[in-house]
Image: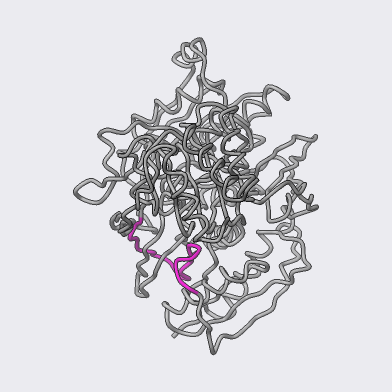
């Protein structure tokens, strides 16, 4: 089976987010970058499915030139080749993003049996690009998946709900968005990183449509005005902790 | 004034009611759309029915709770109508275009955005508004579209969860460990305290990525969102990824050797020290108080 995985480069935000002066982006001067967590699991899932059933995996991203780092990371854990839709780094809204991905899939020409997304990106969290791509391609789509089993022409997909797991039987080809926890992604090996440098990467610059979900500015939520009460240092704090737990009524 | 439709998710009454209260910000008439709870969930079919009701009434907006199903059904509506959708909104100002404040990064960052579409499609961030009793709301009960194409993806079976211990999402007390625990075995002190308190055990993403605990224990933006009476976070630095999962906790007790750790900025109570010394001391003190 041939599988496409769509990923997004996002900053590793650490403990505190700071904005650029124009409020259009997170200040990333001192930050590293990664693939959005759900999508890292999507790539791992694709690699496992292909290890079991054969086929080819392709990773796609829409992002700045630097996002090649994330494409190489995904190829280092086993993805075969990459498609890079290069942007100037500005915000693309979900409709423009989906349209560019659909164009790239058509231009690539490979018949994908499965197109994987993360359920939502870590940064924008728009919850819709996978669904829009599926509609444009006329494919079925299921979201929030934590288990995929290929069973002939069907994909058995599992989704956690209150009290259990919902099962969907989805005919391939299909679009599936997954959640972190579907697997534990592997780390790239040194030979994997070496091989990734030589794997094919096709780059192009798609035209950007006018945003219809138009970001005006970013803003930080009101900071907590909390001043933590220091209960003590080291094990000597234990009696005070137990007093507090008793006051709250949990002991 | 045009009508705003609100998708009511069965079994998620409070968040659906919050969506109704939120929709009141748009002005105009409100109508809630409720699906027959006995029907199997089929997102495309539910979306198709919402589209039809919206078109019949010339709805100016469709609002859904920002739940898994709420966001999913609304994304299908958006794709069917080729209209923009803004997920997890905190507030909306009607206009042409409508302006929203919406959550990014699981709520660690907000965004002001303009929604250039009609109908305006918005999902509501959980607990962005408190639900208030609404009057003059029309209720519309519907069955989902039975069209074969819309029923391709539907729930065919639900497998019950094997009940094991205290559920993280519903626990009154959660004791979590982070990178500072150091190993899978290191969690024995966390488990001991959790057992004494009848608490659920949680952890940070660093812990699940290291394979020390299963992902089902992860508290965070990509894990479980918790809302206990008290959250005891041990050896957790307080990355935004983690805080997005525990901001619903009523009280936070942080135990960390680094007095400058960012988690202390969100904590109600702080113990500065090594969890491997502090947590067993708390367990011992509980036993002493209980005389066991």
Residue B169 in percent (x, y) is at 60, 53
Q: Is B155 left, or right, of A117 in this rendering?
A: right
Residue A115 can be seen in this image: no
Judging depth in this view, the residue of A112 and B249 nearest the camera is B249
Q: Relative to residue B21, is residue A219 depicted above or below?
A: above
Quadrant hosting residue B186: top right
Check if residue B118 falls in the magenta segment: yes
Q: Is A174 left, or right, of B208 in this rendering?
A: right
Q: Relative to residue B88, is residue B179 depicted above or below?
A: above
Return the residue found at the far left.
A21
Total number of numbered discs in the rendering: 0
Q: Relative to residue A76, is residue B112 depicted above or below?
A: below
The residue located at (45%, 84%) in the rendering is B28
Residue B79 in percent (x, y) is at 55, 57
Q: Is B125 left, or right, of A184 in this rendering?
A: left
Quadrant hosting residue B54: bottom right
Q: Quadrant of the C terminus of chain A?
A: bottom right
Q: What stretch is highlighted in magenta?
A: B110-130
Colour convention of the picture: one colour
Q: Is A108 left, or right, of A219 in this rendering?
A: right
Residue B275 in percent (x, y) is at 47, 35
Return the residue found at the far front.
B291
Residue A248 in percent (x, y) is at 51, 61
Residue B162 can be seen in this image: yes
Return the residue found at the far bottom.
B136
Q: Relative to residue A64, is residue B183 depicted above or below?
A: above
Judging depth in this view, the residue of A250 and B292 nearest the camera is B292
């Amino acid at each position: 089976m041939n599988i496409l995985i769509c990923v997004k480069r996002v900053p590793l935000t650490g403990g505190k987010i700071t904005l650029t002066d124009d409020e259009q982006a997170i200040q990333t001067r001192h930050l590293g970058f990664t693939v959005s967590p759900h999508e890292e699991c999507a790539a791992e899932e694709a690699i496992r499915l292909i290890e079991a059933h054969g086929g080819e995996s392709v990773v796609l991203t829409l992002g700045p030139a630097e996002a090649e780092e994330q494409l190489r990371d995904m190829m280092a854990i086993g993805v075969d080749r990459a498609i890079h839709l290069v942007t100037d780094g500005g915000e693309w809204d979900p409709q423009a993003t989906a349209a560019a991905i659909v164009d790239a899939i058509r231009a690539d020409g490979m018949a994908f049996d499965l197109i994987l997304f993360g359920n939502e990106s870590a940064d924008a969290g728009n919850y819709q690009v996978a669904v829009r791509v599926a509609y444009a391609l006329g494919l079925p789509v299921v979201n929030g998946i934590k288990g995929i089993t290929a069973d002939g022409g069907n994909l058995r997909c599992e989704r956690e709900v209150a009290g259990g797991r919902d099962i969907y039987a989805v005919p391939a080809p299909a679009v599936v968005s997954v959640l972190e926890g579907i697997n534990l992604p592997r780390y790239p090996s040194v030979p994997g990183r070496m091989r990734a440098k030589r794997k094919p990467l096709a780059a192009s610059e798609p035209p950007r449509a006018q945003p219809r979900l138009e970001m005006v500015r970013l803003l930080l939520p009101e900071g907590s005005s909390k001043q933590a009460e220091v209960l003590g240092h080291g094990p000597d704090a234990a009696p005070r902790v137990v007093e507090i737990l008793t006051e709250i009524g949990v002991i | 004034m045009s009508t705003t439709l609100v998708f009511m998710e069965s079994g998620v009454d409070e968040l659906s009611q919050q969506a109704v209260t939120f929709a009141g910000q748009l002005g105009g008439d409100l109508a809630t759309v409720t699906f027959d709870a006995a029907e199997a969930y089929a997102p495309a079919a539910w979306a198709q029915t919402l589209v039809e009701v919206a078109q019949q009434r010339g709805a100016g907006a469709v609002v859904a709770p920002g739940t898994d199903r709420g966001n999913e059904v609304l994304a299908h509506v958006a794709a069917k109508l080729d209209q923009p959708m803004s997920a997890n909104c905190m507030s909306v100002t009607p206009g042409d275009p409508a302006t929203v404040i919406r959550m990014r990064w699981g709520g660690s960052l907000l965004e002001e955005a303009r929604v250039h579409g009609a109908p305006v499609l918005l999902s509501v961030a959980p607990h962005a508004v408190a639900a208030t009793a609404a009057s003059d709301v029309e209720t519309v009960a519907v069955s989902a579209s039975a069209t074969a194409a819309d029923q391709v993806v539907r729930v065919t079976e639900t497998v019950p969860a094997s009940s094991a211990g205290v559920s993280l999402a519903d626990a009154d007390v959660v004791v979590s460990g982070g990178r500072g625990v150091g190993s899978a075995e290191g969690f024995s002190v966390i488990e001991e305290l959790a057992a004494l308190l009848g608490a659920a055990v949680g952890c940070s993403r660093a812990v699940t990525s290291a394979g020390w605990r299963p992902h089902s224990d992860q508290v965070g933006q990509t894990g479980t969102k918790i809302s206990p009476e008290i959250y005891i976070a041990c050896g957790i630095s307080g990355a935004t990824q983690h805080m997005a999962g525990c901001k619903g906790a009523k009280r936070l007790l942080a135990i960390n050797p680094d007095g400058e750790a960012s988690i202390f900025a969100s904590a109600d109570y702080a113990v500065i020290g090594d969890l491997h010394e502090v947590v067993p001391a708390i367990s011992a003190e509980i036993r002493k108080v209980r005389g066991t």
